[in-house]
Image (cartoon, rainbow, N blue to C red):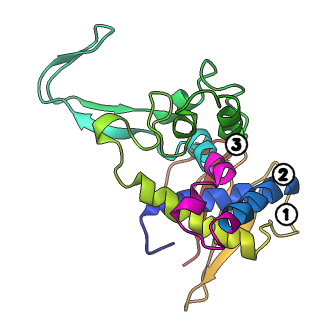
Amino acid sequence: MRQTIHTSGIFTTHALFELARMPANQVEEIRAEIVAAIDSEGGVTNKAAVGKFHLLDSLLKEIGRFHSLFAVGSSRVTLREAVIADGTVLPAGSVVAFAPKPLHHNPDVYHDPYKFDPFRFAKLRKGDEDNAGHDIQQSFTHLSNEYIVFGLGKHGCPGRFFAALKIKVILAELLLSYDIAFPRRRVAHSQAVCIQYLHRTESDGAAYFYEAEGIDITLIGSVPFHLQSSCWIQIESP
């Protein structure tokens, strides 16, 4: 994962965390669908089989919606003065970007937007089966004004299809070979939680991931700042 594009690593890491804390029956549903899809392709994990991983696709899309991997995205600079629809004037040289999180938590678009629902988009697929394009519209890689993880329009990420395929294959192989769970020992839920030992370096250092539960922290040499719930931070010892 360290040798790939960082966004693919971020999505895969989020997925492992979410799979670890999802109810066991939901994980088994995802696993069963993966097995059925691969069996339908003669036991081969090919592109056609991965295209049938609808529950895993839904999980990944919900991760993008709920966690919104960036505070702002698709930054652009105006080359000349521009006036947008509400009359706001943008002088030439203005930096313009969008904030995904408010858009992805819009209650007019998403029911109960602050609830993480791994099967949110899979259920929307089933509820819209009369629409010939329902699979595409609810898929992880689909671009829309309501889901901008991969950008929008002609500047949408061209590598999203390969990234989605790669992430799904990684997760499928892990799910078929392992049960994913947190360590048994955990501190109180209201505190930061050390949830996964990652690696040990030659200097005997270690890296840990912590889940933030609305805590205030101060890093050495830094100003205090606040982490919202469901943020993940990595702390590495020297």
- Percent x, y of residue 36: 73, 62
- Percent x, y of residue 183: 82, 70
**Residue placed furthest toward the left:** 80
Binning the other alpha carbons within 10 Å of mark 2 as few (below 14), some (14 to 19) or many (20 upward) gives: few
Q: Which residue is mark 2?
A: 189
Q: Assign a secondary structure to mark 2.
A: loop
Specify which label sits upstream in the sequence, 1 or 3: 1
- Percent x, y of residue 21: 79, 55
Q: Residue at x 69, y 43 (%)?
A: 229
Which quarter of the picture shows residue 238? bottom right
Marks 2 and 3, how far apart at CA:
11 Å
Q: Residue at x 42, y 44 (%)?
A: 150
The dot on residue 186 is 1
Q: Which residue is mark 3?
A: 214
- Percent x, y of residue 28: 82, 59
Binning the other alpha carbons within 10 Å of mark 1 as few (below 14), some (14 to 19) or many (20 upward) gives: few
Kindly tell me whether residue 50 is visible in this rendering: yes
Marks 1 and 2, how far apart at CA:
8 Å
Give 3 or 43, whichever is nearer the viewer: 43
* Dot 1 and dot 2 residues touching (CB under 8 Å): yes
* Dot 2 and dot 3 residues touching (CB under 8 Å): no
Q: Residue at x 21, y 28 (%)?
A: 94
Specify which label sits upstream in the sequence, 2 or 3: 2
Question: Is 178 drawn above or below residue 110 in the view shown?
Answer: below
Q: Assign a secondary structure to mark 1.
A: loop
Binning the other alpha carbons within 10 Å of mark 3 as few (below 14), some (14 to 19) or many (20 upward) gives: some
Which amino acid lies under the numbered mark 2 shown in the image of this protein?
A: His
Give 199 or 2, whichever is nearer the viewer: 2
Horizontal side of residue 47 vs 59, given as left or right: left
> Which residue range is magenta in the image?
39-59
Which amino acid lies under the numbered mark 1 shown in the image of this protein?
A: Arg
Is 27 included in the stretch rendered in magenta? no
